[in-house]
Amino acid sequence: MINKFIKKTISKITHHTNGYFTLSIDNDGLTYETGQFARLGLLNKENKLIAKPYSYASNPNNDAEFYIVEVTGGAISPQLKALKVGDTVYVDKTANGQLYPENIKSSINAWFFVTGTGVGVPISLCSNPEFLNKYKEVFIVHNVKCTDDLHHNEILANHKKVNYIPFISQGDPDNYNAGRFTDNFKELMSKYEGNQELTALKSQVIIIGNPSMLKETVEFFKTEAFSFRGEDKNIYVERYW
Ligand SMILES: Cc1cc2nc3c(=O)[nH]c(=O)nc-3n(C[C@H](O)[C@H](O)[C@H](O)COP(=O)(O)OP(=O)(O)OC[C@H]3O[C@@H](n4cnc5c(N)ncnc54)[C@H](O)[C@@H]3O)c2cc1C
């Protein structure tokens, strides 16, 4: 298996909170498209490679970036968190995943519904004009636990046609939407009009993150005449576990 990987060196690691960090490595020898993912691997004590998939949050022309959350007691994420600049990580030479620009249909707008580190996928895609040129407007609806988990507002603010809508599920966030976006689909559908309208006629819906959110979101949009399969497909998903 190890010959599918390239040995890379950590060039930067940024700890945003105690459990949420960004790993950066140079892009030399890495092949991927915006929106894809690669396995990151580390050697364990028996010299066996343990690897799990992580979404690229970057553009292939720049350093590769991965947004990672530590799963307490997890097999690999605590070890990734403990890495230092100069340490080795193994990365899939060839990336995987279907959420690259060519594979997502053009339409009036695109709406992302993402939880946690799933925001890396739209950030990667929105760094690519090939993706942005397919839509008049792009929305990123992002659920996180608390305001400390919001780190990417500035990156998204650089894009004129990208609208970032965070939802904070815990505490009482002053300037943000409180709760879960899954409880607010109807409100979102009635709030936006024209080129921003969230409807099966005008939108592609791209859902990334945890399994229960994925299920709830797909079920809702199916009742609103969106399609998960076939020629009219306008729902795309990526499940993290
Ligand atoms: C296509 C794909 C892309 C992914 N991209 C990312 C990414 O960009 N960033 C990232 O942090 N993880 C991502 N993951 C999840 C990642 O691959 C690992 O599953 C995760 O880091 C846990 O690995 P572990 O060995 O530490 O924990 P394990 O021992 O494998 O524990 C797994 C359990 O941890 C929980 N879990 C897994 N992933 C997450 C998560 N992201 N947030 C909260 N809880 C989680 C679930 O309860 C899961 O059952 C992705 C997974 C897939 C399939």
Image (cartoon, helix red, strand yellow):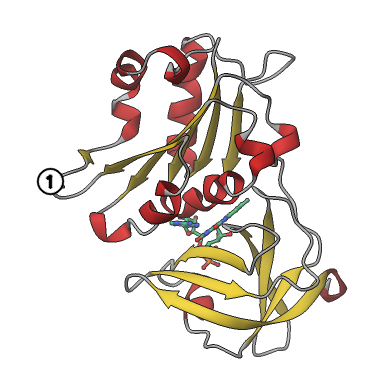
Locate residue 125, reporting x and y percent: 60, 45
- Quadrant where the image shows the N terminus: bottom right
| Mark 1 element type | loop
Identity of the residue drawn at 20% across and 49% down: 170
90, 216: nearer the viewer: 90
Count of residue discs: 1
In this rendering, would 17 be left or right of 130?
A: left
Determine whether the beta carbon of the residue marked 1 sits less than 8 angstroms from the nearest atom of ligand 1: no
Q: Residue furthest right?
A: 3
Mark 1 crowd level (few <14, some 14–19, many ≥20, 10 Å Cα): few
In this rendering, would 239 be left or right of 157?
A: right
Q: Which residue is mark 1?
A: 174
Q: Quadrant of residue 217?
A: top left
Locate residue 93, reporting x and y percent: 80, 66
Residue 75 appears in the figure: no
Identity of the residue drawn at 75% across and 35% down: 102
Query: Is 214 placed above or below 41 here?
Result: above
